[in-house]
Image (spheres, rainbow, N blue to C red):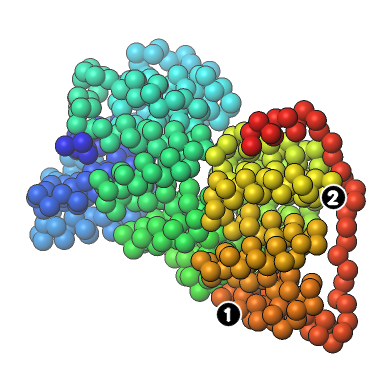
Amino acid sequence: MDHYVPKDQVTTLLDHGLFTSAQLLGGFLVSSSTGNSEASPQLKAESLVLLGDSFFKEKEYRRAIHTYKQALLHLKTILKPTATTSRSSLSASNRSSSPSSFNNSAINENEMEGIPSKAKTLQMSLMMGKLYRYTRHTRAAAACYKECLRQCPYIIEAIIALAELGLPAKDIISLFPQTPSRSARAPFDHLESSRWLQHYVEAQCCIASNDYKGGLELFSELLQRFPNNIHILLEMAKVEAIIGKIDEAIMNFEKVRSIDPYVVAYMDEYALLLKTKSDQSKLNKLVHDLLNIDPTRPEVFVALSVLWERKDDRGALSYAEKSIRIDERHVPGYIVKGNLLLSMNRPDAAAIAFRGAQDLRADLRSYQGLVRSYLALSKIKEALHAAREAMKAMPQSAKALKLVGDVHASSTTGREKAKKFYESALRLEPGYLGAALALAELHVMEGRNGDAVSLLERYLKDWADDSLHVKLAQVFAATNMLQDALLHYQAALRINPQNEAAKKGLERLEKQMKGVDPDAPEEDEENDVEDVDGDVEENELL
């Protein structure tokens, strides 16, 4: 059975004070027993109690209560006190020094280094790994995380950290012990029946190396073995949000909330998607729920920032900044802050925010933000450098190719190059609307309105998207086909009544229908950029 999850390992992780890893492994244990029709109600209840204990130790009290109630439903009777007291027999030191309180710990680097290696507990090794990582001592951090996995392969926090530090999957898997460890209470000899853990390592390494497609495929396979696993669903939703699979990401976030309505992790990412869809009622409810669950989490303030953006940019910015003050390593806080600063015409400050996100975890959104910031500052070379870095980091990403195209499209001499990048992006991902819209815009800029219309109408057959209708309306308006433009603006507003581009387009159209030229497009002849070395590099990548 290749999806066996050892219950004793969750117990061991709890006993060692590794509550986050216990929570993640407990999730696999519960979803494994839930998906197994042969599992007894007693086993399911015991698994749920262990998961509930991990929530309790992490101070996620509402999730703990929700989980304990599920355990009671399986047993149909009140659990005896002995069923839970065995889980609470942690040492005083474990109770007081949870990894979640790491930022408040008075332990410093020198004190940690003075502890003999034999005396270091699993919890201490994990804490040292975090400390070294936060202070950018990458090699020392990796050594600590490796030591954790040599003793216990189920410390999932260490797996994720090593993947993010760039360690290949095979190197992480090679750390797993093949024989029981003396230092741990329970043996770690279940590896033969835990192939799923190796697939999990491979999935995390794919995501960390920006191979989003490969990571999603592996997570999807794991989800079949562990149905309704909240951690896997959240990881998939997060990646789908980054690569623009909005509907799939929303579906997974909603599934998570239906399984456990008290989840806070990644819910700020869900809020961003609801804003993209202009689903104000769901966004309002989400923020209301999060405030009731735990108003001290950074995700809550990012979600508040997203909600507040429509009313007041400054208020939204203060919420984003508060999320960073709560947790200075919370990447979505920097992304939201950067986008807000761009909308407030503060590209210098926006670039700093996006660089902050990149320092923590470089992903597509931080690259996109940097490119937009540099273009707004007319720093074309810097924008091109950032876009090429994205292309190198994500060679199979159509979004990265499109980003390089955007920089070239910003100057009149670069439009032919931009066209090649947009076309390459569409060959790599034919359904990528962003590249189709950008290519259509390029056709319009060069007077090929017919090409733009035929391209957009081809996509309109398969996608009922408001941005497609807006772009078509703009092209028709530019070619004086005002009635067609009106129809497409109206179609866009039927799909998304909050579409600002459609609203402004209708205003412009009214002027055109009265025979008034609303404005003339401005050609930016400046910022032409020549970069021979970069051109060679780009051609190789293409």
The picture quadrant where one finds residue 146 is top left
Q: Residue at x 33, y 55 (%)?
A: 63
The residue that disc 1 covers is: 494
Secondary element under disc 1, as helix, strand or loop, is: helix
The residue that disc 2 covers is: 412
Task: Say if residue 298 shows up in the picture.
Answer: no
Q: Is residue 136 above or below residue 289?
A: above
Q: Quadrant of the N terminus?
A: top left
The amino acid type, in three-letter code, at marker 1 is Arg
Secondary element under disc 2, as helix, strand or loop, is: helix
Q: Nearer the viewer, residue 453 or 212?
A: 453
The picture quadrant where one finds residue 292 is bottom left
Residue 302 at what x, y percent from top left?
Answer: 57, 56
- Outermost residue on the bottom side: it is 514
Identify the mark at residue 16; answer none if there is no mark.
none
Q: Nearer the viewer, residue 511 or 8?
A: 511
Q: Is residue 481 above or below residue 443?
A: below
User: Sequence-wise, which precedes: disc 2 or disc 1?
Assistant: 2
Residue 238 at what x, y percent from top left?
Answer: 47, 50
Going by the image, does 82 lie left or right of 453?
Answer: left
Q: Residue at x 43, y 15 (%)?
A: 115
Marks 2 and 1 sit apart, C-alpha to C-alpha, by 35 Å
Q: Residue at x 36, y 57 (%)?
A: 256
The amino acid type, in three-letter code, at marker 2 is Thr
Task: Say if residue 541 shows up in the picture.
Answer: yes
Say few, some or many: other residues with alpha carbon within 10 Å of mark 1 (under 14 / 14 to 19 / 20 or more).
few
Say few, some or many: other residues with alpha carbon within 10 Å of mark 2 (under 14 / 14 to 19 / 20 or more).
some
The picture quadrant where one finds residue 345 is bottom right
Going by the image, does 193 lie left or right of 411?
Answer: left
